Image: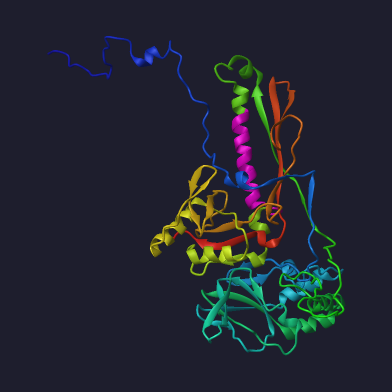
Amino acid sequence: MANPIINTGDTEHSSLGTAGARQLATTTKSQPQMQGITPRWLLRMLPWVQTNGVFRVNRRLTYSAGDDRLNFSNIGAKVEVIPQELLKLPLLRGFDSDEEGLTVRALASRFVQKEYKAGESIVEAGQPAEHVFLIAHGKASKLGTGKYGDPVVLDTLADGDHFGDQAVVESNDVWPFTVKATTACIVMSLPQQVFEALILQAPALSAHVARYKARLKKPQDKSGQAAIPLTAGHHGEPVLAGGFVDYELKPREYELSVAQTILRVHTRVADLFNDPMNQTAEQLRLTIEALKERKEHELINNREFGLLHNADLKQRINTRSGPPTPDDMDELLSRRRKSRFFVAHPRTIAAFGRECNRRGLYPTPVDVLGQKLNAWRGVPILPCDKIPISNTLTSSILVLRTGADDQGVIGLHHTGLPDEVEPGLSVRRMDINDKAISEYLVSTYFSAALLVPDALGVLENVEIGS
């Protein structure tokens, strides 16, 4: 019987195959490619100001203390107020004494937890205002009454927001608004009687509250700044009001941050494998790209100067219904002048597009540096994947007014560095170590500053999964 033919997969060729020919040919190759390089619109659109180490933002004196959102801890369903978080309240901002720790802990322990269902009222307009309320979780609407008696939404409150901290320092006052839970809410409350009893036991806190009351009574403009006395619409020769413009005694200072790395290249690679591409140059190019990506990430997320963490509480708003709607974008624009651009995660931009499609709206794109981008009311929406998306598929949208002339957001950097390869970015050759490896220190110094609070607005808790 003849042996069967076994197919080994090999095929006979009558000419040289490509696999063999490549051994003698010079290939055409690309530069090393890298995933994760983004347009970095924020770095391109921010105006950059030369800074020698520290940038100080001088402002007019403000009587109304800034505030911030509070954080809470929980064990199961039991929520607790973190004592030091109470110092973020305008009422307690700047409270400093030897008994501070003990007093603040005592104050935090007296907050009472209460839960509200969606649609329930937390406070009613006209009722006595006798509590401080902290919203630990959930969303609520602050409601007022319109000119013709119809309800109007004054504000939206969410996790970490608070109200009533001024109510506990006044007597016989009533709530001028209604707060109603939009979703299920967990609220921490402190009665005025408990607060007043604690004041009697803590002289330092009593003195601090007295100073806070005095500040509230000083003449202020709508921004809380010390008012400048002016006279207008008068006739004859009346005595004119006089005064001066006072400044903050402790203005904020922004120190330049740094992003650095050390690039290592073996001398054997640099000596023998530099044709047709310079190995060191390609390694530096990709390292610089990664450093710039980190720079934009820090400008968004750094807790000291990042835009997400430094927006004023009054400039942070929540969506009315969850997804980013045209109404929400209009609310952002209405709170500032000369908005230059929005910044949002690409998935958030897609969610906004879905809401526009749902309403039959098709915004006109605009030209930005030669590229067509989505826009709303003529303000471009710049994509930035450095804005985080939470596990619950929520994100944020930022809107910026930029430039020193418009009291906006500015980027800070320092140029003229030794071995500078780009403005504010240097590559310094270090020693060759005993393993024959060359080292290069790659550095960039940067920060960002808000000249006035309304230069930056943030739309928070934007649902992108709906």
Q: Is residue 424 above or below residue 252?
A: above
Relative placement, left or right, of 278 versus 304 is left
Can you say which quadrant of the picture contains the N terminus? top left
Q: Is residue 460 above or below residue 17?
A: below
Can you say which quadrant of the picture contains the C terminus? bottom left
Which is the main secondary structure of the residues drawn in magenta? helix
- Which residue is nearer to you in this view: 183 or 141? 141
Image coordinates of residue 55 in percent, x first then y, are 78, 50
Does residue 256 show up magenta in the picture?
no
Q: Which residues are magenta?
A: 284-305
Image coordinates of residue 346 in percent, x first then y, are 49, 51
- Which residue is nearer to you in this view: 143 or 400? 400
Image coordinates of residue 62 in percent, x first then y, are 78, 68
Q: Residue 96's image quarter?
A: bottom right
- Which residue is nearer to you in this view: 213 or 202? 213
Does residue 291 show up magenta in the picture?
yes
Q: Is residue 56 above or below residue 271?
A: below
Instruction: Please name the residue shown 70% across and 26% down the image.
Output: 439
